Image (cartoon, grey):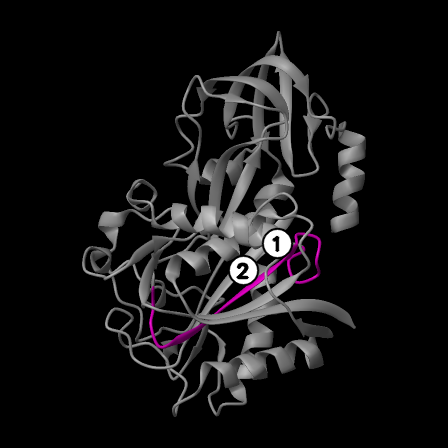
Amino acid sequence: MRPDDRQYLPSHEWVKIDAQIATIGITDFAVNELCSGNEGDLVYCDLPELGRLVGAGETFGEIESVKAVSDLNSPVAGEIIEVNPEIEDHLEILSDDPWNRGWLIKIKVSGESSTSLVDLAAYEELVAEKE
Amino acid sequence: METWRQITTWGAPPEFNMGLDGALLEDVDAPPTLRFYTWTPAALSLGYFQRFDDVPAASDAFVVVRRVTGGGAIHHANELTFSITASAKHSLFQGPIPRSYERIHELIAQALSRFGCDPAMRGDSELSSDISDTGMCFHHSTSLDLAWGGRKGVGSAQRRRKERVLHHGSIKLGPSQYDTGVAELEGSTDPAELARVIAEVFRESAKIQLTAGVPSPSERESAALLGQKSLDPDFIKRR
């Protein structure tokens, strides 16, 4: 069950904003696209340094799976204030719990959000078209 | 029948090869493109996330570049290299990444089988070409890799952006000092002949008609910048 307390990008990142702090991760659909259920295929995730500024829609990191490097895109603009310290050594968290323990970064929001963000219902429709 | 652009560049410098593939990935308006190329001089390419020190051959090779695609290192000598760049929405690239490799490998396997070998995805079988601690792509196989004679025969990797995907492939046509013990096409296969047959399979099986083309002026400009980055010591030793 995908949570309805956040917004989604068509590139399969999610964002949950609370008091101008955006928590960002990737969806279960994204994880399946990356590794088709074989979490051992996820080999590396490169997350940004603290203090870096990102724009809405810009790449904030990269993840490698099955010899494919994929971009991670930010749904909001702002400053990176926290990265999940568990992810790099425990990529299986992304499969096990993409919505909570699998968060990737936190951003102090300081600008517009991506105009591509959609709510859960629209995201479910988008994913259904791909399945 | 779709129409794609085919760009063929024999014996180009390593930085041109990497730069042009990068340019084809970045230009979201570029037509879908199948590239065939060889390298002069021979060069070793590191995977995007590889540590330089995890690849012993990188300290020994004459020229080293870093790719934007993942996977392990490849010594580009006596091989045909190809790249496929198209929209992320193209049927070759849609869906889970493993399925994308399967679709492309099915086409490449068809082409290779016309040269007398019997390529198939490795599955659960063991390969004699798997060698620990070299960091070389051909010495580390996955279930989706194409192999024949118990050895890995095609190196593959991808880079995925929001709107576009780049797929890299390498097929050995002869020995390489670092990619030892891997499958090669038998006989003295000419890279141009192998490229011709791959293009034929794309037309027959994927319904993709290839039209000979060249990089646009903006692609050349972008390729020059990205090519320099692929050679930049800071980029090569970033990890």
Secondary structure, mark 2, is strand
Q: Earlier in the sequence, mark 2 or mark 1?
A: 1
**Residue picked out by circle 2:** B167
Q: Residue B27, position in %: x, y?
A: 62, 48
**From this viewpoint, which residue is outermost toward the front?**
B217
Asked if the residues shown at circle 2 and circle 1 are in contact, with their CB atoms under 8 angstroms apart, the answer is no
Amino acid type, callout 2: His
Q: Which part of the image, by quadrant, shows the C terminus of chain B?
A: top left
The residue at which mark 1 appears reads as B96
Q: Position of residue B196 (x, y in %)?
A: 57, 82
Dot 1 crowding, Cα within 10 Å, few <14, some 14–19, many 20+: some
Q: B91 and A84: which one is in front? A: B91
Q: Residue at x 66, y 46 (%)?
A: B163
Residue A14 is situated, as x and y percent measured from the top left of the image, at 64, 29
Identify the element where label 1 is drawn.
loop
Q: Is residue B81 above or below residue A91?
A: below
Residue bounds of the magenta highlight? B75-94
User: In this figure, what is the number of numbered marks?
Assistant: 2
Corner quadrant of residue A28: top right
Q: Is residue B215 above or below residue B53?
A: below
Q: Position of residue B98 (x, y in %)?
A: 56, 59
Q: Is residue A88 left or right of residue B96?
A: left
Q: Amino acid at mark 1?
A: Pro
State the residue at coordinates (45%, 61%). Answer: B17
> Is residue B71 placed above or below B211 in the rendered structure?
above
Instruction: Give the residue at the far top of this rendering.
Output: A19
Question: What number is the disc on residue A104?
Answer: none
Pick the front one: B227 or B79: B227
Where does the N terminus of chain B fall, quadrant-wise? bottom right
Q: Visible in this render: residue B68?
A: no
